[in-house]
Amino acid sequence: MQQLREIWRTFRRRPMGIVGALMLFSVVFVAIFAPWLAPYDPDVKIDIDPEDLLAPPDVEHLLGRDDAGKDVLSQLIYGARVSLTVGFVASFMSMFIGTTVGLIAGYIGGRIGNALMRLTDFLLVIPDLPLMLVIISIWGRGLWKIIFVIGVLGWTYNARLVRSQVLSIKERQFVLRARAIGAGSLRIILRHIFPQVLPLILAQAVLSVSGAIIAESSLSFLGLGDPTLVSWGMMLNFAFERAISRMAWWFLLPPGFAIVWVSVGLIMMGTTLEEIVNPRLRTHHLFDPRHMVALIAGVRPRAEAEGAME
Amino acid sequence: MAILEVRNLSVNYLTDEGTALRAVEGVSFSLEQGRSLGLVGESGCGKTTAMLGILRLLPAEGRIVSGEVVYDGVDLLHVSESEMREYRWGRISIVFQGAMNALNPVRRVGDQIVEAIMLHESVDKRTARGRVDELLGMVGITSERASQYPHQYSGGMRQRAMIAMALACTPNILIADEPTTALDVMIQAQILDLLQKLQKELELCIVLVTHDLGVVAEICDDVLVMYGGKTAEYASADIIYNESLHPYTQRLLEAFPDVENPASTLASIPGYPPPLDALPPGCRFEPRCHRRKDICAVKSPPLLAVNSGHYVACHPDKGRLNGATNR
């Protein structure tokens, strides 16, 4: 889609966004190739030698070992999988719910729209983390339960954002024209309004992934993570309970650093995207690179020069 | 036989305070195949509202309170919304005021016209695309441009693309709501020529909404002059220009420059059109009328038939409008 191409054209000139994207993709890379990158199986105790428990980093175990003698680096690498899965799936869920609610509330409005927005306000004012704690402690711990809870509670901001955009877009003339050609509401929402809010949703989604990762880490840190999986938050939890007193910094710092790394990367990327997308960039037909005219003789239009390079 | 009969159409706008503003009141006209009607009047006199009412595209606050819109024997105000969708664009299409903004900025122009065609006809995409090229050709846009986005078009091109889109499903009636506002004079002339040419080729009915009497004289067979939401005068263009009887129409014509006598100063009509929340109790034009009588301030004039096909809403004078019958 042309709009996305235009966003990319601006995005690739922003160092902050590019650095953020690289930070994110480094983690994605690690998560995908975890079995090849991790030196040990994170779940297997290497030795039952008491010397190995919380052993400091050495050549064989670059980030030392935890209190059960397991390799910290391998846990960290596999932990990326959990964090990213939770981040992306939960974010997709909340984007999906938020976008649907925002589109309906914005386009249909009236009583239905009002009811939906009051529900949104209601969820928005309840602090997420305590609510998640309550739900998870009643419902039980599990990766998909955590994803579900984060996704289902995280859509409110997006719903408001989409609704406010829809309210302004639906007054634009092409929406009236779409009705005049005989299009029904569903078609107008999906074909005419949704494409207009899509870039905004994408930028928002990137930001919300980092929110979901932090939420999962918080839950795990507080002891409500999936007990069968090692996530970064879980590592922090173990380290906090058992390692700090013994000054085992190699167990505490890496997961914390990993969480910060991926969140900062996502936020840098998301903020850049938002900056590009939110005050809507307008192009004029005269400034389309394909028609741009070089004003000084001998200077080629930029698009042409770029085309020649590619 | 008339293809479209609008009878006594009245539209109200509901305000937040619960009062109703009478934006259009008792407007009637009929359109025959291949003829064109000019809808003339000042800004805010209900021209666009009447047109949106016909297509049932009024904003949420708008209510059609009475009247009939009979298209080919069917009252459009009483068909279901899904049936109405068939009529929109399939039979009656509209080019909006400032139509250059009526294209979706993030979709290709060609695709938008294809969408209109495929909503109404069961043709495959390839056929529809062929038709798009043809339509764009008709309005003087080369077919390579179909794959471009609206921002790559100039204003006049977008307007012409909208006209092409309006003709996509071969409608019987084309409502053109000020199709030339915001365009320069050259493009205006092009668009009007285009409309005239298309009308002849396709036997189209055109309803032209405008304040430009010159344009009306050139294109329209009949003219409906509106003032403050009501019909002031309705007749053939010839009668309106030469034998108009309503003081407003007369003043409107005087306010238009005369090619044969360009040096004379233009007349203007003092005052403003009545605000919809404070309509005068009698004739709506009474406060500005140069021929007002006592009765005008208290009683709204009925629409009188002077001759066949000439209607005036004005209280009869001695020697004027005698023999006119109440419609």
Image (cartoon, rainbow, N blue to C red):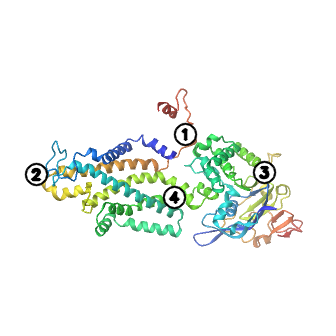
Name the residue: 50% across, 46% down. A3
Query: Going by the image, does A281 lie left or right of A19?
Result: right
Classify mark 3: residues with Cα within 10 Å, few (<14), some (14-19) or many (20+): many
Query: Spatial distance from mark 2 to mark 1, Cα to Cα?
Result: 69 Å
Per the image, the residue denoted by label 3 is B219
Q: Is residue A19 visible?
A: yes
Q: Secondary structure at mark 4?
A: helix
| Residue B262 locus on image (x, y percent) | 79, 45
Q: Secondary structure at mark 1?
A: loop
Q: Residue furthest top?
A: A298
Q: Give the label on residue A288, or none.
A: 1
| Residue B68 locus on image (x, y percent) | 73, 68
Q: Give the label on residue A166, or none.
A: 4
The one of A234 and A39 positioned closer to us in this rendering: A39
| Residue A122 locus on image (x, y percent) | 40, 68
- Tag 3 subunit: B
Is label 3 in contact with label 4 (beta carbons under 8 Å)? no
The amino acid type, in three-letter code, at marker 3 is Ile
- Which of disc 4 and disc 1 is earlier in sequence? 4
Give the number of the mark in front: 3 or 4.
4
Query: Spatial distance from mark 3 to mark 2, Cα to Cα?
Result: 100 Å
The amino acid type, in three-letter code, at marker 1 is Asp
The amino acid type, in three-letter code, at marker 4 is Val
